[in-house]
Amino acid sequence: MIDRKDPIQVAFVQGGMIAADNLSGVESLGTVDYEPVWMFYRKNSFNETMYISDRDIAKLKINIGPVGSGTRTQALNIFKLNSLNGDAPNLLGLGNAEGVQALERGEIDAVILVDGFDSPNVQRLITNPDIRLSSFVRADAYTRLMSYFEVVSVPMGGFDLGKNIPDHPIQLISTTTNLLIDNRLHPAIQVLFLEAARDINGPKSYFSKTGEFPSYLNTEAPLSEEAKFFYDKGTPILMKYLPFWLAEFLERMFFLLLPFAAFAYPVIKSIPTYRTNLAKKQINSIYKELDKFEKNTIETFDPKRRSEYIEVLNQMERRVLSSKAAKFATADCYSLRSSIEFIRNALEKQVIYKGREE
């Protein structure tokens, strides 16, 4: 995925194997499972009354996996923290299955596995009476020094209550399985991967609680925006009721149009106000004409022109009725028509114009 020409766009990557200094274009959809570090040894390798640490076991003839494997990388990281030589001759490079068989035959003293609880190799060794599982008593220290490690535990009797195996609590350190993507991967496909991870990895397992996965435990790679939304809001609501393609289309359109709506809303909201203000402006303009008409008529009143004056008022009223003001400022419109009617009645009765008659 780091190679932008590579067609691979999704990968399961073990924590600690992520090249944090070269992650351009790579994002995470989160963690989907635990992968504990199991350190098994033959019980006759030590006097079991003695305190046994992971440092002691690392000095045995121990298989840490082939070169390039995740198991070997994790083992060498652990040894480095303990100032142990990663090139020591006691460190073998057999495959996991070969190493387990060699341990059972007594050809080697110990083996490190990085694998899930249900792994056949792990299950073989935890039920073998000649084999012991080491506890990382300094597990918290490992998680502080290597942030991609988590602490998981096995309680007393956690493997077999009837036989009380193990006969004491065991702490393990665990890396994680992480789902990494090319950041060009379509958001809809990212959602499908997250949905699948929730269905497959969401149920309770030996080390995880129901609903614990997927989650963002390993922070070596940045979380994608789509995954952030998924963890915060869950599955897009429309996907519960509509076909995936339609739900995804509507979801994308919603977020595409949301900024436009935020911009357009105040504009749309102002349209009725704008129309009303424009209508009132028209009415005020006719009011001014009416005021001017009345003043001129009072000053120059001629009884012989009464019909002419009334026709001017009739034209004003027709203009009011045909204007947009009649729709958007009805109350103001009726008030103006009442004023026109008042002056028209005064002219017909000559109430205020008698002084001008001869």
Image (cartoon, rainbow, N blue to C red):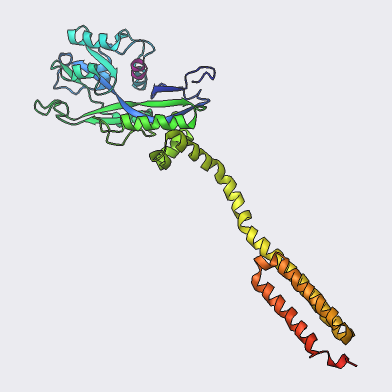
Q: Nearer the viewer, residue 333 or 20?
A: 333
Residue 41: which quarter of the image?
top left
Give the x, y percent position of residue 256. 55, 41
In the rendered structure, the answer to whether residue 357 lies left or right of residue 71 reads: right
Residue at the farthest left position: 162
Q: Nearer the viewer, residue 47 or 67?
A: 67
Main SS, magenta region, reads: helix
Residue 303: which quarter of the image?
bottom right
Give the x, y percent position of residue 352. 80, 90
Q: Is residue 302 magenta?
A: no
In the rendered structure, the answer to whether residue 49 lies left or right of residue 185 reads: left
Task: Judge whether residue 302 can be spotted in this image.
Answer: no
Task: Judge whether residue 104 can be spotted in this image.
Answer: yes
In the rendered structure, the answer to whether residue 322 lies left or right of residue 166 reads: right
The C terminus, quarter of image: bottom right
The residue under the point 30% across, 8% down is: 94
Q: Is residue 18 above or below residue 230?
A: above
- Give the residues in magenta: 70-75
Give the x, y percent position of residue 66. 34, 10
Give the x, y percent position of residue 308. 85, 79
